[in-house]
Each structure stands twice: as structure tokens, then as C-alpha cells.
Amino acid sequence: MTKKLRFGIVGCGVIGPYHAQAITSLPDAELVAVADLIPERAQKLAEKFQVTPYGDFQEMLAREQLDVVDICTPSGLHREHASQAMRSRRHVIVEKPMEISSAAIAEMLRVQQETGVKLAVISQHRFDPATRQVYDLVEEQAFGRLVLGNAAVPWWRSQAYYDSGEWRGTWELDGGGVLMNQSIHSIDLLQWLMGPVRSVYAYTDTLAHRMETEDVAVAVLRFANGALGTISATTGAYPGVSTRIEIYGDKGSAVIEDDRLSYLHLARDDSEEVGPYGVAPEQRVPSSPAGSSAAQDPAALSFRSHALQIADMIRAIRENGTPLLDGYAARHSVEIILGIYESTRTHKEVTLS
Ligand SMILES: NC(=O)c1ccc[n+]([C@@H]2O[C@H](COP(=O)([O-])OP(=O)(O)OC[C@H]3O[C@@H](n4cnc5c(N)ncnc54)[C@H](O)[C@@H]3O)[C@@H](O)[C@H]2O)c1
């Protein structure tokens, strides 16, 4: 029997416990140790999963035989923690965003190249069945010429959420607000499905919270394939409404609401000839309401998509292959967000390299 891969987690706040659940749900993985600067947090998670707690990440790296380290610390610490783990020859899974600046991302990629370990970045919604289905249809060119791609994230976070951690809503450690923290998931999916973004023009503001970074943003996009798009996002939309990703082409349209495919219509499935105004409303696929989600509650996540992504990393390690979302794939969503911030500052369209 193949040996189970041994995992350690650093950061036992909101998302760390989801990693613990995801890792322990996989037959090929074993959780060995957890670390947090706040020892009680490490202790609590360690007790639940019967593993060793550490108050010091370095000590966990030095003492434990680990194959993979999951980085679940504040976003602006990902470079530091991921690089330390990679330099100790551990494979790394790092939470989104990969990091909050281009320089930090470049350094992580450099360390990954030097050490030869695998680096995966969490974007768990790429593993949702609805996203996979739409991605496969895009690959088959089932939507024809893509013309428009929209991502809407009308979420709600209370002031208490932002006050719950000193790093939240700061430029230094969150790296941004609703875009860099919450909407990065949808931005990653949008650019994965529509293709790379060539340029952005944007407005952002802080309207409903006391925080440094933005809680509302709109951006218009031009994709490299010529299609147009939009991103609209806020954490000020009480009580939090479902996320929508819309993909429109001249041979089909799809809408993903939260992690469900709520609308799909492809010309290739039409049995009757379609008139100049498209398919009549009564013949369209009805869209069904989405359930409760992370739109209202940051902890209302399932660990299952994380488990699928961690399983993908295990596959990459075993086959000496590449994880679906390696550092090179993960940098795009951060670059789009940094472009949006630059456009807001300069009041100019920003072209992405
Ligand atoms: N994929 C998702 O859906 C998802 C959801 C929530 C958060 N996240 C990401 O996960 C990361 C953590 O977010 P969170 O909400 O869990 O934050 P959090 O503040 O709840 O938890 C972070 C933990 O890291 C610990 N920590 C900080 N510095 C440390 C250090 N030097 N050594 C050891 N531990 C240290 C803190 O004490 C804290 O317990 C962020 O990058 C965030 O963007 C992802």
C-alpha cells in the first residue's frame, strides 16, 4: 500500500479547520500537526483531530516529518510561510490569494523553482461540478464566440467580521478588501472560463464599513480574446446575495449561481429553428434560487471542494505532475485585482502584461 502523505497546517483561525476536515477526509492523507501563533487555537484544533499542536511554525517544520504544509495564515504572510516551508523541502498548499503583491508572488515562484517542490494555491470553486461542466463546454467551444463574461459578488460582512482580526480590511496584510479577499474566487473562475484579461478600468470605494480597503468595486474588462466583461462586488449588500458568474457567447449562455449551474442553453441542443430574437422566454431553462452560502457567513463553507483540490495536489505529488492551480495559474486573479487597484488610483485603463 502507498504511504499516506503527512500534512501539517499553519494558521488555525477560520479556514485552518476546513483544511483539517478536508485532509482527514482523504484516504491518501494524514494530518500530523497544526501550528498557530495563538497556542490555544492550535491546541483546540489538535485536540479535535488528535494531532500535535505547535505555537511556533518553525518548530513544527523542524520537528515533524511532513510531506505537505497547508498555509492558512493572513494573506500578506503567505510568501514568508510558503517560502519557509518550501525551503525545508515540503510541498505547499497555500490559501487564496497566493499573495498580495506581484513581488511576493514572483519570490514564491522563484523559491518553488529552486526547491523543485509542488506549490498549489486554493481556488476551491474550480472543483465545483458546475464550474467543471462550464469549463469543459468552453474547451469544446460550445458557447461559440465568447462575447461577455460577468462576475457579481453582492455579499455581506458585518463590521464585527472586519474587527474580528487586526489584519482584516488592511492593505498590509489583507492586501485589499472585497476584491482581494472575497471576490478573488469569482475573478479566478471568470478568467479561467473566459480566458486571460487584457485590460481593466475600475472604481472602488469604502461605503459601509470602517476599514482601510474597499468594500465596493466595479470594473470593466477586455479579455484577450476580444470579449468584454464586468466585475461588481461588495461586502455591503445586506444580508448577502448569491454569487453569479455569467458566460455569454453567440452559441450559448451559462449562469453559475454560487456553486450551481442555474442556467445553461446551447444552440447545439436546440431542436427547432430559433428566430432573430433568440429563444422565447417560455422555452428557456428556468433559473432556480440558490441556497445559503458564504454570501452571508464566512464560515458557511463546505470542506468538500477543498478536499477535491487537496486530492488534486496529492495526485500531482504522486505522479510528479502539476497541480491544477499551481503558482503560475494562481497569479492571474491577483494581477487582475492589482490592475483594478491601479486603475482606481490613476483613473486610467490598465493593461495587464
Ligand atoms: N478558500 C476560502 O474559501 C477561504 C475562506 C476564508 C479564508 N481564506 C484565506 O485563508 C487565510 C486565513 O484566513 P482566516 O479567515 O482563516 O484568518 P484568521 O485570522 O481567522 O486565521 C489566521 C490564523 O493565522 C494565525 N497566524 C498569524 N500569523 C501567524 C504566524 N506567524 N504563525 C502561525 N500562525 C499565525 C493567526 O493567529 C490566526 O489564528 C487568508 O489568506 C484568507 O484569504 C480562504
Image (spheres, rainbow, N blue to C red):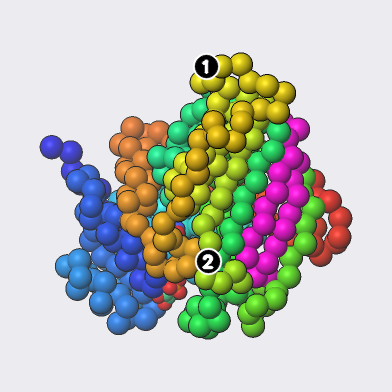
Compared to residue 183, the image places residue 117 above or below, namely: above
Most foreground residue, 325 or 289: 289
* Above or below, 236 relative to 122: below
Q: Position of residue 136 (x, y in %)?
A: 48, 29
Q: Quadrant of the C terminus?
A: top right
Disc 2 marks which amino acid? Gly
Q: Quadrant of ligand 1?
A: bottom left
Q: Which residue is mark 1?
A: 271
Of the 4 image quadrants, the one containing the N terminus is top left
Q: Which residues are magenta?
A: 214-234
Which residue is depicted at the point 70% across and 74% down?
206
Q: Label 2, label 1: how many angstroms apart (C-alpha)?
A: 39 Å
Residue shown at 63%/79% (left/top)?
209
Picture residue at 77% right of the left edge, 62% below the top: 203
Percent across and percent down for residue 105 are 59, 54
Residue type at the position of mark 1? Ser
Residue under the image location 37 percent in, 81 percent down: 38
In the displayed structure image, the side of residue 143 where residue 83 appears, left or right: left
Residue 133 in the image: state x and y as whole percent.
45, 33
Above or below: residue 283 compared with residue 24: above
Q: For residue 216: magenta?
A: yes
Q: Main secondary structure of the magenta part?
A: strand
Q: Is residue 36 visible?
A: yes
Q: Is residue 44 left or right of residue 97?
A: left
The residue under label 2 is 240
Q: Quadrant of residue 11?
A: bottom left
What is the x, y in percent for residue 110?
Answer: 56, 48
